Amino acid sequence: MSMLISLFSSAVNADQVLLPNPNGTYQVGVGTMELTDESRTQPFAPSVQVRSIMISLFYPIKSDEPTTPVSYMPPETALYEDNSEQALTGLMSPNGTFEKLALQLAGKPPQTQYTPDFPIVLFSPAEATTRLFYSLIAQTIASSGYIVVTIDAPYDVDIVEFPDGSVILLNTTVAATAALSDINIAVTARAQDASFVLDQLRNTSVVSQLIPGCSQGLDVSKVAMFGHSLGGAATAAVMLNDSRIAGGIAIDGDLYGPVVQKGLDRPFMLMAHTNRTHSNDSAPLDPDNSWFNFWNNLRGWKLDIMLANSNHYTFSDFPIVLETLGIVLNATVAANLLITDLNGARALQIVTTYIAAFLDMVLKCKSSPLLQGPVPEFSEVTFEL
């Protein structure tokens, strides 16, 4: 079962702040949708509820038309983030801060039959973080010729807003406890979500609502996935059981479940913030040494890279969002947000360039010197062997 939600408002207002337009080959369109898996329930809901998730699908378009501003997030979510970030981190984000933001998306939907001959990439966000705070990363990757699908996990991200206006907030009790049993449940649910989304993307009626002018299901026989923090754990977990996912990236987060000991036989990349690698995992970063154990059990191509002067949320839209809004952080707020003073545009460039290089290798059979060792143009990136 699925339901279409219209794109966030594209109306221009005087206070609107445009996020940078990616410089890839393609313009990008986006469709959002609620998908419901009647065979499962929400694991952290206060009562029995079927599993409903929200996705955003970013798709490439060849177009010479001017781009159109589309709100970065819907008003209810934006207001929640204004208040939440202010309360939790001390960020100066009065009401209306995040609502100002807009992505620069394709000005017109495809005017002819849309042929979806682009590889598919799935994305899972960090715990307690909406997928919408990764939309510019997703758009940037899509602009280089990928269909990118970002997936929210209700009750373990901070807020999920549905087409009927209802919202599901983070189960703060579960998040605060961080019990290993709950983490394993969350990772399993997200892994199942990823496989469910791939199944749904084969459905012509689903795809035709997400991509105007597309009258066929998508080829999901060979895709890739990346995830941030808990989303990285979900990426590794689903690869253990779903062979359609040909390669994965775990960004800056512990790994959980059987995949740590069983390993994988397909390409996998670890990407991390300053001083975190598979070879120095230790408390408090990763008390179970999951990266160390996982790395040693990987049987396919593998790579571990580290970004200098970075922190956990450097691998999200936060740095470029705050830079675009003109918000200058003091050291305390930056530390609370888990970011650094690394330039936002530079952080976005590095993160998306290395993700795209990996995707090119796995899905387009293109080799890149970026994955073979340090290069001068990205001196911030080091390789851990």
Image: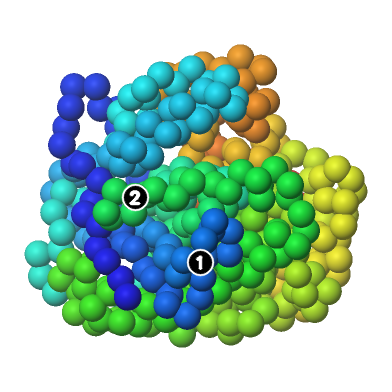
Q: Nearer the viewer, residue 5 or 285?
A: 5
Give the residue at x 25% y 27%.
16
184 in relation to 200, above or below: above
Element under label 1? loop
Q: CA distance from mark 2 to mark 1?
A: 17 Å
Check the image and report above or below for 174 versus 226: above
Kindly identify which numbered label has been placed on residue 166: 2
Q: Amino acid at mark 1?
A: Val
Of all residues, the one furthest to the left in this rendering is 111
Please name whichever residue, 71 or 349, is drawn nearer the observer in this view of the structure: 71
The x and y percentages for residue 238 are 61, 74
Residue 101 left/right relative to 153: left
Q: Quadrant of residue 285?
A: top right
Would you say residue 24 is visible in this rendering?
Answer: no
| Circle 1 residue | 48
Q: Position of residue 354 (x, y in %)?
A: 57, 53
Q: Look at label 2 and name its amino acid.
A: Ser
Q: Are marks 2 and 1 in contact (CB under 8 Å)?
A: no
Residue farthest to the front, as pictured: 47
Give the residue displayed 59% in from the left and 27% down from the top: 88
